[in-house]
Image (cartoon, rainbow, N blue to C red):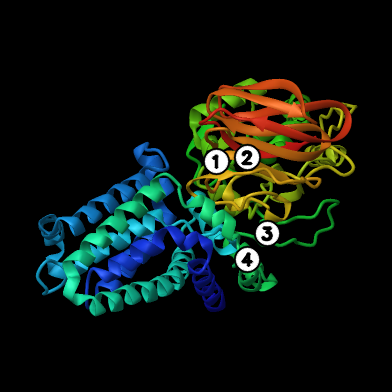
Amino acid sequence: MVVLLGVAFVAGVITAISPCVLPVLPIVLAGGATGSGRRPLAIVAGLVASFTAFTLSAAALLDALGLPQDTLRDAAIALLFVLAATLLVPQLGILLERPFAFLTRRRGGELGGGFLLGVSLGLVFVPCAGPVLATITVLAAERQVGLDAVFLTLAYSIGAAIVLLAVALGGQRVSRRLRASGQTLRRVAGVVLAASAVAIAFDLETTLQTRLGSYSSTLQRHVEDTSYARRHLTELRGGGGTLAATRQTTGAKLPDYGAAPDFLGISDWLNSRPLSITDLRGKVVLVDFWTYSCINCLRTLPHLQAWYAAYHKAGFEIVGVHTPEFAFEHVLSNVRRATRELGVTWPVALDNEYATWDAYRNQYWPAEYFIDRRGHLRRAHFGEGEYGKSEQTIRTLLGERLPKRMTSVPDTTPTGFLTPETYLGAARLDVARYTGTNPVVGKEAVYAFGDTLPQNDISYGGRWTLQPQIALAGRGAGLRLHFHARKVFVVLGGRGLVRTLVDGKPAGPIDVREYKLYTAVSAPALHDGVLELRFPPGIRAYSFTFG
């Protein structure tokens, strides 16, 4: 972990010399120039504190309060305007800084104003996303914020803050040389601060960032994109073993992995009272990890339905553990509606906090765990396919009173090469399959489609706001995908009509009315082509899957 913290620190330093830091540089410089003594330290302390705290907790806090995800950013921009006003009107500055006077013996609470400035910067500072920041955002999105995540975020933010501290100290040196015109300097700094806040509010700096390109990407690859860093970041996100227990050698046909983990941290149950593995003793149980917008899970459902109908009376039970991939899948009413529409009649456990997922050390949607009558785990299967083998496992574990014939549901698992699953949110965006304007995370930016689009690549056009899980469409938003598949599915949310074009020709529109999986392309045979989606503002795009 110590080495990983060093990687995070250096990644933060690289972020602070990248184009992503441009919007906050004038503010840090002006903030340092308008004070003396320890004010630059106060600015940096405020930045580190707010960036660390709100990166890890903002999503949960805003969800709890029912507020939009950009509320804190808007509040920070407003605070920047207030601080600019304090530089232009000194009396207002004295009133604002008075509550922080206990932090310093100096008249006016100079440290307090610097700390407030740093807090606001921490909320509008949007670093360039790399593996370290991606890990932090995924942990925060999954509410898995432990000490390791806190220390990783602190190391990252301190690395960035060290560079910004040097900038603030440089501003302080300038102010000392111009001490005779201190009041004029404060007013100039106030104007700079206000102008920077306007630029951030309206994304006016995006064009400059884009033209400069990602000149820090080479450094980033050699620091946080190494095999060592990726391996340890994966472990921090919960990677590792996939079976819940060590295999035990027995004379049985199926291996015995020991007692199956129980259902932990379940927020709600559908189609059933709360259950435990102990309650299900004497039954053969299939624990199915799924989520209702996952196309791979949806293609598995007909097989589960057939098995449930054929074997339930013989002592077979399914427990669907619904572990959400996206934020809208946490909502009970959404899961209840989807369960009803999809014909899921067996017990469904809502694992919103990933507690049962972690107990099984699971990493896949869908994933099937087969449990015998004693409550022991006997087989696990990940993904689609092998339905015949899975059904034979059920029959072997039941051992009696079985239908003579196995079920006969066609296996629709795609075979051959297909475009891989493609995420559109910043945390899981595959930059190796992305073409066009460099992604800007956490705020609206203008994107231009790439001149060419290699197979399996995506490209954004128009105005988009990339958040960890989603891409939020703005004015003129478009998305292009070079796919190789028969069917293309896309997870969307919001309300509006999305226009579709395949190889430049109009296709049927997508009428988005709820958060779910929509079919964008359904061709009679495997097709290699370019799909373009044109979005009205406010639509949220999550991921593409293929069939």
Secondary structure at badge 4 equals helix
Q: Are marks 1 and 3 in contact (CB under 8 Å)?
A: no
**Direction from residue 233 to residue 103 in the image, left or right:** left
Instruction: Indicate the position of residue 151 as horizontal and vertical percent values.
Output: 45, 69
Q: Are marks 2 and 1 in contact (CB under 8 Å)?
A: no
Mark 1 lies on residue: 464
Mark 4 lies on residue: 217
> In which quarter of the view is residue 48 placed?
bottom left
Q: Are marks 4 and 1 in contact (CB under 8 Å)?
A: no
Secondary structure at badge 3 equals loop
Amino acid at circle 1:
Trp
Mark 2 lies on residue: 461
Instruction: Indicate the position of residue 242 as horizontal and vertical percent values.
Output: 69, 56
Amino acid at circle 3:
Ala
Q: Nearer the viewer, residue 282 or 326?
A: 326
Q: Sequence-wise, which precedes: disc 1 or disc 3?
A: 3
**Label 3 vs label 4: CA separation?**
41 Å
**Direction from residue 467 to residue 86 in the image, left or right:** left
Q: Residue at x 34, y 68 (%)?
A: 29
Quadrant holding the N terminus: bottom right
Mark 3 lies on residue: 245
Secondary structure at badge 1 equals strand
**Direction from residue 55 to residue 128 in the image, left or right:** right
Q: Sequence-wise, which precedes: disc 2 or disc 4?
A: 4
Q: Residues within 10 Å of mark 3 (few under 14, many from 20)?
A: some
Could one spot residue 108 in this view of the protein?
yes
Q: Sequence-wise, which precedes: disc 2 or disc 3?
A: 3
**Closer to us: mark 2 or mark 3?**
2
Amino acid at circle 4:
Ser
**Label 2 vs label 4: CA separation?**
22 Å
> In which quarter of the view is residue 518 placed?
top right
**Label 4 vs label 1: CA separation?**
22 Å
